[in-house]
C-alpha cells in the first residue's frame, strides 16, 4: 500500500506552502500558559509537530473562524449597499488533524447543510483537504471516541488517513480529494507491499455506554434532579463549547465603522453563557445553570441524533480536559446510561 | 485530611451549615465537591492539587449554590482573600458563610521541575504568595509545608517589563489574538461578580464582542483594569483559559501598580477599603493632569 516517510510528510507540507496553499497543522505556540500544540496556519513546514498530542483548541476554526464578516454595509442617500465577503479562495490542506476533529467537521456538515446551505462553511470545506493522523493510543483517560461510534483510526471526515509505522505512515486514501493530493505529489509517496493498516481499534473491551439508552433516558428526563446535581460545580464558563470540535453555535453582530457603514459578523457563541437565550422581553428560558448544562447534553445526545441519526460528540474529551471545575462528560454519560438501563 | 473531614461532619451534624464546599477525588485529580451528608463529608480531600478557588461559588450570581443553604467553604490563603473581596465589595455578608481555612502548602501544577513527585512544579503564583495561611476564617486546619520555590510570577513580570514597549505589545498582541471570547476567565473569577458584565452590554456596545484584535484588546484591558486592586492572584482566569493566555502576568503587573500608587494590597482583611471603594483627600490623582 501507499506509504509516506516522516521526512516526506514534512516535505509535502513544504511543497504545498511553496505552491501557495495554506497549510494548517499542529505547531508549538510561544507565550502560552498551556504547554503543547495548537492547530495553526504554518509559516514553514518545520513548525509541524505531530508528536505532541491532541491540541486543546479544535480544528473547527479552519472552517468556522471564531469571527468572520458576513457582509459589509454602506448606507447612501438612495439605498443600503451590501458587499459580500470575497469567497474563500485557494487550496487549504490540513496535515495532522486527528480523527475526532475530522469527524467533528463531518457532523457539522449535517447542520450547516440543513434547511439552507451555509455557503461560507461549505466553501471552506470544499477548498480543504484533511490529512488525518490516526491516534496510536488515547491522548489520556479523557478520550472516549470508541464509545460514540468512532475510534482512534476512524476515517469519517478525513480525505487521507495516515497510520503510523516505523519511520513514517501508511496512507489510506479515503476520498477523491485525498487521492488527488497523492497524485499531485507522487515523489512524496511510495508503494510498499509489506505495509498494512494495523487494527488499531482492537481490544477496546465492551462498550461502557449505550447511546440508544442514553437518548431514551434523556427524552424522558428533561426535569430531573440529576441536572441540578451535575450543574453544582459548573461555572457556566463555556470553555467546553470553545474546545468542542462539534459545537457550532454562533452569534451575529453588527459593528459600525461609522454612522453610515459597518460590518455584520458572526462569532462563536456558547449555550453555557447565561445570556445566550435571553429574549428581547427580558425572559430567559434557560435561567438556571442546570438548564444550560442539560442543554449541552440534550443537544448532543438527544436532539441531534433524533434529527441526524448520530450524536454531536466525537469523544475527544476536550471538554473534560478544559473544564476548570472538573466536569466530566463521559462520567455524565456513564451515569445516564446506567440509569437508563436500570429503568427500561 | 481527617481533621477537615471531622470538622465538616461536625458543622453538618450541628446544622450550622447545610453544605461544605471542598474538594473530592475524581478520575483526573481533584475537583470541587458539595458535601451535604456525612458520607460526602468523609470524601473531602485537601492537598497540593486543590488549585480551584472555591470562593467563586459564594458569588451572588451562583443562585444554584445559594439554594443549598448556608455554606462552609474551604479556603486557602488566596481563596480567603477572594472571600474578603466579596465582603469588602458588599457581595457577601460575613455571617452568611463559614470559612474553613487551610494552612496552604502551595499548589503543584504540571510542568516538571526537580524535587517534586510526578513531573510537578510549584504554581508560579504560590512562589510569591503574600499569605498562605488565611486569617479570615472560622476554623483553621492542616499543616504548614515548606516555602514554595522557583522563578515565580514576579520574575515573569520583570522579564516582560524589561522588554522595549514594541516587544511587549507584540507579546500581548499574539497572546490576545488567540482569545475566542468564551469569557471563561470572567466566569471563574471570584471577583467578576457583576450581574451583567460590561462586555455583555449591547446598547451601546461598549466592547466589541468579536474576537478580532480590536475587540480582544478592548476586552482584556477592561477585564484587567476592572480587577486592579481587587484581583487576589488566585490564577483561576489563566487556568480556565482554553487558549492559554498568560493572564496572571497582566494581573500581577496591575496589582504592582496599585501597591505603588495606593499602598493597597488585596489582603484577607475585608475592613480595609479598596482604592476603588473609598475617597481619600490625599489621593495623588497624578493621572489627571
Image: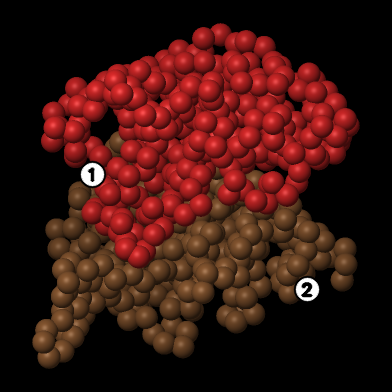
Chain colours: A brown, B red
Figure quadrant of the C terminus of chain A:
bottom right
**Who is closer to the viewer here, B98 or B217?**
B98
Disc 2: which residue = A220
Horizontal and vertical percent position of residue B112: 47, 24
Query: Label 2 marks which chain's residue?
Result: A
Give the Cα distance between marks 2 and 1.
48 Å
Residue plotted at (61% across, 29% down)? B50
Mark 2 secondary-structure assignment: helix
Query: Label 1 marks which chain's residue?
Result: B
Disc 1: which residue = B173
**Who is closer to the viewer here, B57 or B245?**
B57
Q: Circle 1: is it few (<14), some (14-19), or many (20+) Cα within 10 Å?
A: some
Mark 1 secondary-structure assignment: helix
Instruction: Please say if A1 is above or below B89.
Output: below
Q: Is residue A291 at least partly visible in the picture?
A: yes
Q: Is residue B229 at least partly visible in the picture?
A: no
Amino acid at each position: 500500500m501507499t506509504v509516506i516517510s516522516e521526512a516526506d510528510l514534512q516535505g509535502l507540507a513544504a511543497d504545498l506552502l511553496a505552491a501557495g496553499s495554506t497549510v494548517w497543522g499542529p505547531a508549538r505556540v510561544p507565550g502560552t500558559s498551556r504547554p503543547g500544540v495548537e492547530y495553526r496556519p504554518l509559516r514553514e513546514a518545520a513548525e509541524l509537530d505531530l508528536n505532541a498530542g491532541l491540541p486543546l483548541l479544535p480544528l473547527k476554526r479552519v472552517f468556522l473562524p471564531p469571527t468572520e464578516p458576513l457582509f459589509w454595509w454602506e448606507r447612501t442617500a438612495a439605498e443600503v449597499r451590501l458587499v459580500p465577503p470575497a469567497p474563500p479562495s485557494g487550496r487549504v490542506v490540513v496535515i495532522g488533524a486527528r480523527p475526532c476533529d475530522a469527524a467533528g467537521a463531518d457532523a457539522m456538515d449535517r447542520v450547516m447543510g440543513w434547511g439552507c446551505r451555509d455557503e461560507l462553511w461549505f466553501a471552506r470545506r470544499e477548498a480543504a483537504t484533511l490529512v488525518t493522523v490516526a491516534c496510536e493510543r488515547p491522548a489520556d483517560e479523557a478520550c472516549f471516541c470508541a464509545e460514540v461510534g468512532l475510534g482512534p483510526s476512524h476515517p469519517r471526515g478525513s480525505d487521507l488517513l495516515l497510520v503510523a509505522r516505523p519511520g513514517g505512515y501508511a496512507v489510506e486514501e479515503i476520498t477523491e480529494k485525498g487521492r488527488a493530493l497523492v497524485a499531485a505529489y507522487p515523489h512524496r509517496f511510495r508503494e510498499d507491499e509489506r505495509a498494512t493498516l494495523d487494527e488499531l481499534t482492537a481490544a477496546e473491551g465492551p462498550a461502557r455506554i449505550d447511546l440508544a439508552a442514553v437518548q431514551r433516558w434523556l427524552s424522558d428526563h428533561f426535569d430531573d434532579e440529576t441536572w441540578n446535581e451535575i450543574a453544582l460545580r459548573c461555572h457556566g464558563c463555556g470553555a467546553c463549547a470553545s474546545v468542542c470540535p462539534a459545537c457550532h453555535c454562533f452569534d451575529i453582530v453588527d459593528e459600525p465603522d461609522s454612522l453610515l457603514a459597518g460590518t455584520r459578523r458572526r462569532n462563536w457563541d456558547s449555550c453555557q453563557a447565561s445570556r445566550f437565550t435571553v429574549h428581547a422581553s427580558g425572559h430567559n428560558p434557560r435561567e438556571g445553570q442546570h438548564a444550560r448544562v442539560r442543554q449541552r447534553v440534550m443537544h448532543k445526545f438527544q436532539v441531534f441524533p433524533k434529527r441526524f441519526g448520530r450524536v454531536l460528540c466525537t469523544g475527544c474529551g476536550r471538554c473534560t480536559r478544559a473544564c476548570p471545575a472538573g466536569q466530566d462528560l463521559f462520567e455524565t454519560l456513564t451515569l445516564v446510561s446506567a440509569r437508563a438501563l436500570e429503568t427500561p | 485530611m481527617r481533621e477537615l473531614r471531622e470538622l465538616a461532619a461536625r458543622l453538618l451534624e450541628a446544622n450550622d451549615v447545610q453544605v461544605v464546599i471542598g474538594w473530592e477525588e475524581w478520575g483526573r485529580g481533584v475537583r470541587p465537591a458539595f458535601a451535604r451528608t456525612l458520607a460526602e463529608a468523609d470524601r473531602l480531600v485537601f492537598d497540593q492539587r486543590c488549585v480551584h478557588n472555591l470562593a467563586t461559588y459564594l458569588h451572588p450570581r451562583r443562585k444554584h449554590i445559594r439554594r443549598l443553604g448556608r455554606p462552609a467553604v474551604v479556603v486557602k490563603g488566596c481563596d480567603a482573600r477572594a472571600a474578603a473581596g466579596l465582603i469588602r465589595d458588599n457581595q457577601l455578608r460575613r455571617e452568611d458563610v463559614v470559612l474553613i481555612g487551610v494552612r496552604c502548602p502551595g499548589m503543584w501544577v504540571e510542568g516538571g521541575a526537580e524535587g517534586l513527585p510526578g513531573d510537578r512544579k510549584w504554581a508560579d503564583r504560590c512562589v510569591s504568595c503574600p499569605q498562605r495561611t488565611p486569617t479570615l476564617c472560622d476554623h483553621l486546619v492542616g499543616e504548614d509545608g515548606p516555602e514554595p520555590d522557583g522563578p515565580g510570577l514576579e520574575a515573569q513580570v520583570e522579564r516582560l517589563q524589561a522588554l522595549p514597549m514594541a516587544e511587549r505589545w507584540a507579546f500581548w498582541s499574539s497572546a490576545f489574538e488567540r482569545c475566542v471570547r468564551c469569557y471563561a476567565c470572567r466566569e471563574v473569577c471570584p471577583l467578576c461578580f457583576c450581574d451583567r458584565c460590561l462586555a455583555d452590554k449591547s446598547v451601546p456596545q461598549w466592547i466589541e464582542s468579536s474576537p478580532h484584535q480590536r475587540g480582544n484588546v478592548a476586552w482584556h484591558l477592561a477585564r484587567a483594569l476592572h480587577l486592579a486592586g481587587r484581583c487576589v492572584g488566585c490564577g483561576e482566569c489563566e487556568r480556565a483559559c482554553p487558549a492559554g493566555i498568560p493572564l496572571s502576568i497582566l494581573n500581577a503587573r496591575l496589582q504592582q501598580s496599585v501597591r505603588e500608587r495606593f499602598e493597597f494590597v488585596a489582603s484577607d482583611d475585608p475592613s480595609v477599603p479598596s482604592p476603588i471603594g473609598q475617597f481619600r483627600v490625599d489621593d495623588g490623582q497624578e493621572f489627571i493632569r
